Amino acid sequence: MNTHKPYMNIGPGEFIKEEMEIRQWTNKDLAQVIGLSQKTISELLNNKQRITLDTACYLGSAFGQSPQYWLNLDNNYRLRQN
């Protein structure tokens, strides 16, 4: 009998939060660094807004990863929701 282990579908918002914690940034700090509104940052952190190519570029620039990293996190999260 095959048993499946449950997994946690961790959204990209958790990864953004980790990067912010490392830098001791608030939502306001990140909004200023990447030029997005605090509302948008909040929606990203809560996985309510998709990461677009532009947003991925901003995040990559702010945190030192490639835009592809952020796009992959978001796409994988969204695919596992269905």
Image (spheres, rainbow, N blue to C red):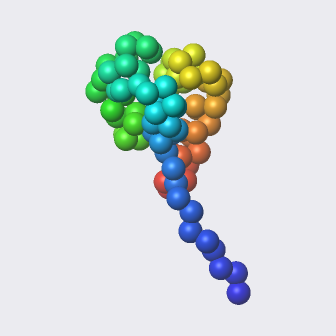
- The image quadrant that residue 47 belongs to is top left
Whether 80 is drawn above or below 20: the answer is below
Instruction: Name the one closer to the observer, 29 or 53.
Output: 29
Residue drawn at (71%, 87%) of the image: 1
Question: Could you say where residue 38 lies in the image, as x and y percent from the top left?
Answer: 30, 23
Vertical side of 52 occupied by 8: above or below: below
Q: Nearer the viewer, residue 26 or 36?
A: 26
Instruction: Give x and y (percent) for residue 17.
Output: 45, 36
- From the viewer's perspective, tell me whether residue 47 is left or right of residue 12: left
Indicate the position of residue 61 as horizontal and vertical percent values.
57, 16
Question: Relative to 80, does residue 40 appear above or below in the rendering?
Answer: above
At x 58%, y 31%, the residue is: 70
The front one of 14 and 80 is: 14
Q: Can residue 26 be seen in this snapshot?
A: yes
Asked whether residue 49 is in view, the answer is no
**In this rendering, position of residue 61 left or right of residue 29:** right
Most extreme residue toward the bottom is: 1
